[in-house]
Image (tube, grey):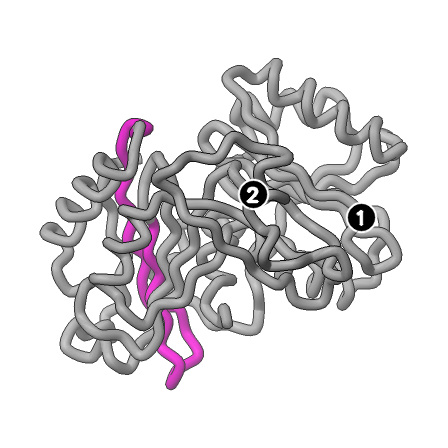
Amino acid sequence: MPPHSRFLDKSFNKLNTRNYVMSALFDVSGFSISIYDPDKNKIIGLVTYHFEELNGAEEINAQLDHFLNTVSWLSFPFLKVCIVYRNNLNTLIPLPLFDKKNAALYLEFNHILQQENRIFYDFIKHTDAVNIYSLPMLLFEKVKTIWPNSLLKHASTILIENLHVLVKNKNDNNALFVNVTKNSFDVVYFKDNKLDFYNQFQFKTVTDFIYFLLSAIEQLKLNPESVKLILLGNIDKGDAFYEIIYRYIRHISFIKRNDNYAYSYVLDEIKPQMHFLLFNSLQCE
């Protein structure tokens, strides 16, 4: 994939951004931006920017500056802006146990906190859970300078909320969702329409990947012969990750796009499982 790619509908007008909704997904390996036209209920644009994994907020900010210099209209005023940040510094807490005064303590139980990071939390819709996470203060200040009225969500919040709606509508209790990114993947499982399991796994090799996935399936006491594995994210038929899953798990499918939106013809060449998080963050609140 090229470092920088744009897919823009012919109806897109950079002078009309005040009437569009922008969603931006950030992580240490790149940025992805989607543009939604509420008047047409259509996603009309996708802009991506990829780079080698960075080590700190200063480097990410520098790349963001370069990105915005390349695509200057992204810093124009929008009707609404949703910022989605992905990292592995998050933890889920049952809502009845949550006290915002102790947010840092909950997170510190599972992660080493960095002084330069700030703590945030999301109430996950339709679940009795709170998602606590941290992100670099420098990046947060940068984003708020560029998009002052933007809403912030953790990527796992968007993932869980949207998958829960999908499961509830289909009433399917035997589906295991796996969201694959460049060097990590999320596993989400619902039981009786309630969130039963969520975890994020870091991997370096295909062997790491399948080991963690099969361990999660075993922990959930699911049967690889009968579980319905639904894939989304950066995975497709023919790649090494798909092939090794196919070796161990019988029922595999890819998630479909949310049919509550229309999609520009320019997105036809992008597989439906790609950018699921980004496209489904449009209505974040």
In depth, the one of 196 and 17 nearer the eye is 196
Picture quadrant of residue 42: bottom left
Q: Residues within 10 Å of mark 2 (few under 14, many from 20)?
A: many
| Residue 220 part of the magenta segment | no
Describe the element under mark 2 as helix, strand or loop: strand
| Residue 45 part of the magenta segment | yes
Nearest to N terminus: mark 2 or mark 1: 2
Which kind of residue does numbered mark 1 sit on?
Answer: Asp
* Magenta-drawn stretch, dominant element (helix, strand or loop): strand
User: Whole-percent x and y of residue 273?
Assistant: 54, 48
User: Whole-percent x and y of residue 111?
Assistant: 56, 32
The Cα atoms of the two marked residues, 2 and 1, are separated by 17 Å
Whether residue 224 sits left or right of residue 265 in the image: it is right
In depth, the one of 98 and 123 nearer the eye is 98
Describe the element under mark 1 as helix, strand or loop: strand
Residue name at image x 63 percent, y 41 percent: 231
- Which region is colored magenta? 32-54
Q: Is residue 104 above or below residue 165?
A: above
In this rendering, the label closer to the viewer, 2 or 1: 2
Whether residue 79 sits left or right of residue 43 in the image: it is left
| Quarter placement of the N terminus | top left
The answer to whether mark 2 and mark 1 are in CB contact below 8 A is no
Q: Which mark is residue 196?
A: 1
User: Whole-percent x and y of residue 233?
Assistant: 52, 43
Residue name at image x 47 percent, y 45 percent: 134
What residue is pinned by disc 2? 90
In depth, the one of 281 and 57 nearer the eye is 57
Which kind of residue does numbered mark 2 sit on?
Answer: Asn
Q: Residues within 10 Å of mark 1 (few under 14, many from 20)?
A: few
In depth, the one of 206 and 247 nearer the eye is 206
